Image: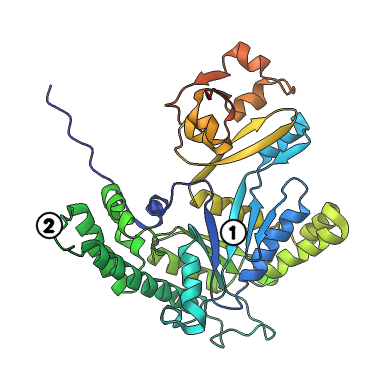
Amino acid sequence: MPPKKAAKDEMNVGQAGASKWGRVKTSLKMGVVGLPNVGKSSLFNLLTNQEAAAENFPFCTIDPNEAQCAVPDQRFKWLCDLYKPPSKVPAKLLVTDIAGLIKGASEGAGLGNAFLSHIQAVDGIYHCVRAFESDEVIHVDDSVDPCRDLETIQSELCKKDLAYVTSQITMHQAEKKGQKPKKLTEAYISARDKIVSHLEQDKPAFMAGFTDAEIGEFKVVAPALITTKPIVYLVNLSKKNFIAKKSKWLPKIADWVKDHGGGTVIPFSVEYEEELYEANKAGGADAKADVVKANGDCKSVLPRIIKVGYKELNLIYFFTAGEKEVRAWNIYNGSLAPQAAGAIHSDFERGFIKAELCAYDDFKEHCGGKPSMANLKSLGKYRQEGKGYTVKDGDIIEFKFNVSK
């Protein structure tokens, strides 16, 4: 038989391949970005406060502009209800509140360079845009036009990236005295030319489309590119428009996003979310439910914002469950069993022997309502996996390891 042809390197176009440009870590961050007075800090505070108010989803403030938000998950809640452990630790999403950008930020306007550096430091972007009118909240450009605002932010990010990537290319290609000129690969040259061309046109780099080889070659040279990061677009509406699920801006924003590489668009309302939060704070879950019912069963979208951001960073989690603790552990999607073990402790990875595990759905179906693996073992649903096993989202795992002194 003739040899098989090598598989063609697939093209990653738009937001679909954005996570491949990022860091392969478990402590990845989403940054809230936008113009001043669009609701960024209010959203950040709501994410923080709603976690503080949720009994099963605590958060931990790290510093004034960064917090860990628990990822809502009914699977985690069910395991906690079953095991009733004293320690309950959900999966966490790191969120950073980044001060507002203005036109000219890439040239230093409004301390823009410092803020743009903060965006470089995160792994994904919540792009918050204003689509509500208010005489009390002044717009930095004196009028509400979310599509114009999207263009402004995108242009500043592209300009920052162009300056950064030009500098990185110069350093990478510089000839060192006494050394032969560096040989540039075809993948590097292709990625370089596409990125520079797009950025010069104020187009995000991810819109160019790249093969895995191009991404692998170029992200080593320019690891802090902004316009290759995954983006979730958050549209801040008035309470009235959010409950009615109508706004003249939503179709225009959807078209803009489609024309600029795609991405998830989530309408929300700071005004309404604050009302829900205050009701919960004053009267608990029942009072919050009354507000929801009085507004056409319109529920909070904060849980969705958190879960979508988590997914965009290409993160998943596995569970450890016992009488002392139920915990969800962040790992990068595609992690092998030893790497997942390392999320608990480096000794677990270094001395990895095997993983004993089952899928969450199998456990829920066959455990018989008891916090025990006995039924699953008898059914062959509880199994052993070695170093080559790729951990799945929701796996319930116990690692076996041995570290010799």
Q: Position of residue 147 (x, y in %)?
A: 48, 75
Taking the image as shown, residue 112 lies to the left or right of residue 396, namely left
Q: Residues within 10 Å of mark 2 (few under 14, many from 20)?
A: few
User: Where, quadrant-wise, is the N terminus in this rendering?
Assistant: top left
Residue 50 makes an appearance in the image: yes
Q: Which mark is residue 180?
A: 2
Name the residue type under label 2. Lys
Q: Residue at x 81, y 58 (%)?
A: 280
Q: Is 222 drawn above or below residue 329 in the view shown? A: below
**Toward which corner of the image does residue 15 lie, by quadrant?**
bottom left
Q: Residue at x 73, y 24 (%)?
A: 371
Residue 301 makes an appearance in the image: no
Q: Nearer the viewer, mark 2 or mark 1?
A: 2
Please, what secondary structure does the residue beneath circle 2 have? Answer: loop
For this orientation, the residue located farthest to the bottom is 142
Q: Position of residue 25 (x, y in %)?
A: 48, 47
Q: Is 2 drawn above or below residue 140 in the view shown? A: above
Gap between marks 2 and 1 measured at Cα:
45 Å
Q: Residues within 10 Å of mark 1 (few under 14, many from 20)?
A: many
Name the residue type under label 1. Val
Q: Are marks 2 and 1 in contact (CB under 8 Å)?
A: no
Taking the image as shown, residue 209 lies to the left or right of residue 318, namely left
**Toward which corner of the image does residue 295 lie, by quadrant?**
bottom right
For this orientation, the residue located farthest to the right is 283
Please, what secondary structure does the residue beneath circle 1 have? Answer: strand
Give the mark nearer the N terminus: 2 vs 1. Answer: 1
Q: Position of residue 332 (x, y in %)?
A: 48, 42
Q: Position of residue 112 (x, y in %)?
A: 48, 78
Which residue corresponds to mark 1?
Answer: 95
